[in-house]
Image: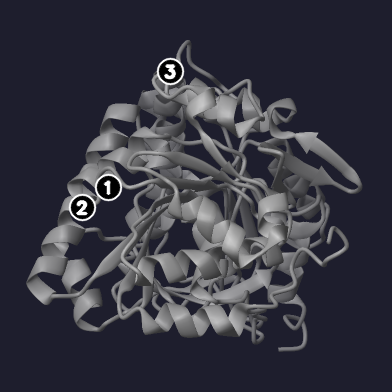
Amino acid sequence: MDNYDPLERPFEERISTLFYGQQMSLVIVDDDPTGTQTAHDVPVLGDWSADAFIHEFNLKTPLFFVLANTRSLPKEEATSRATEIGRNLLNASLKTGRKFMIVSRSDSTLRGYFPTEVTALSQSAAMANLPVLLTPAFFEGGRITENNVHYILEGEKKIPVSETVFAQDKSFGYINSDLTKWIEEKSEGKIKQEDVKSLSIEDIHAGIEVISERLNALQPNDIMVINSKTYRDLEMTCLVIHQLIKAGKGFNFRTAASFVSAFAGIAAKPWKPNNVSGASKGGLTIVGSYVKKSTSQLEFLLEKEGISPFPISVDTIVYDSSATKTYMNVLVDNIENELQKGIDVVVYTSRELISGASAEESLAIGEKVTSFLVQLVANINFQPAFIIAKGGITSNDIAVKGLGMKRAIVLGQVIPGVPVWQLGEETRFPETPYVVFPGNVGDEKSLARVYDLFTENKTGA
């Protein structure tokens, strides 16, 4: 059983039939925009108003993403936003008669607000007290859950996630890799480890009847850890979830990106640029993510010839507000000049992480830096050939706040785990390919590989 290809999708077509037969909309409320890592040809909304949801429900859109970006907010604001989104979904459903389900999609390395975000969404959407299925596996990124322990795969090594840099996150750090203990930790002891349920890989391999028995036994407000090492494991579980939903049982979900793909019967779709750069204008890459992987990817990219680098001083942004406006204007002028000459630009924040004394202060500093990047993009008036945004919060805010995105379409994945959107007509740069490059995806060469795909035909254009 353990020799299966983790990305093999044996039940994809069968699940797709079940999913589309449900006649309801699956709404993925994304705490940053990287949940589109495994989907294609579906909308992603930068607007969570009731009107935006009414539009999708009237279209009978089977699946769409909502960019809540709650991971960038303090806990109270994140909870308030989740409540607003749930309420607007419920109102839109009542007005259109369209049924819906919610997936709270978060980080596969366990950073984010749990269980508060799921509770806020479900209560405001009239889905309170349903059992919660916790499924953080993200196979494309080497994240699996086995014996309730969440691991990151690096080559042949299984590293408990609490032993990685992600567990030291200044805002969302944790000490437990065992998800039953992690839930107790994150709930501040309100949910005890011994009360957390578990669907083991052995249960899944025992077959449909055992999975059904375990899921059907869940009581209101139970939380169950869903173990899985492969898409086969996850699809077996999703087959049963669909059967139980059809029979009237409800669930709430906290998941990473692989669950969305497995539950909807959607496979990743490779997408390749069609010589979008040409010789006449440059592309724009923006790196805001500070994780170690992003820094090594940035260093590798900057070794390439012909790139014009623009380092951004975080010290200036955070500590010298009087100089910020002049600093911004000079950067914008220089970047536009390079883009117009057909030179590709890489904008990146200085790599030394500045943290606050508390999680809230660290978030506020991050918001200040991201806001500067957003304003930078908002002030650029020359349309780049392409935009690559590195980092979840960075890519969300640049799209929504910097470019005015309200609705984009996920085209597919330029490399595994890295989605590309087509920006809508309402944006400042319509139809520009927009790459959402998560901070923690790929190896050190991955960012350069994506850049190469956009520029490989440039000299011959």
- The reply to whether dot 2 and dot 1 touch (C-beta < 8 Å) is yes
**Residue at the (44%, 54%) spot, across then down:** 216
Query: As rendered, which of 162 and 178 lies closer to the eye?
Result: 178
Between 368 and 264, the one lying in front of the other is 264
Element at badge 1? helix
Residue of label 3: 188
Check the image and report above or below for 76 versus 63. above
Label 2 Cα crowd, 10 Å radius (few <14 / some 14-19 / many 20+):
many
Q: Amino acid at mark 2?
A: Ala
In which quarter of the view is residue 269 placed? bottom right
The answer to which of marks 3 and 2 sits earlier in the sequence is 2
Q: Is residue 437 left or right of residue 19?
A: right
Q: Identify residue for label 1.
A: 122
Amino acid type assigned to the residue bearing label 3 in the image: Glu
Q: Say which residue label 2 marks.
A: 125
Q: Residue furthest top?
A: 357
Q: Is residue 196 left or right of residue 364?
A: right
Residue 241: tell me if it is visible: yes
Residue 106 is situated, as x and y percent measured from the top left of the image, at 49, 47
Q: CA distance from mark 3 to mark 2?
A: 25 Å
Considering only order in the chain, which callout, 3 or 1, is on the residue closer to the N terminus? 1
Image quadrant containing the C terminus: bottom right
Q: CA separation, marks 2 and 1?
A: 5 Å
**SS label for mark 3:** loop
Q: Secondary structure at mark 2?
A: loop
- Callout 3: 10 Å neighbours few (<14), some, many (20+)? few
Find residue 299 and report its horizontal and vertical position in percent.
78, 45
**The residue under label 1 is which amino acid type?**
Ser
* Residue beneath the point at 45% across and 39% down: 223
Task: Please count the marks in the image.
Answer: 3
71 in relation to 406, above or below:
above
- Marker disc for residue 373: none
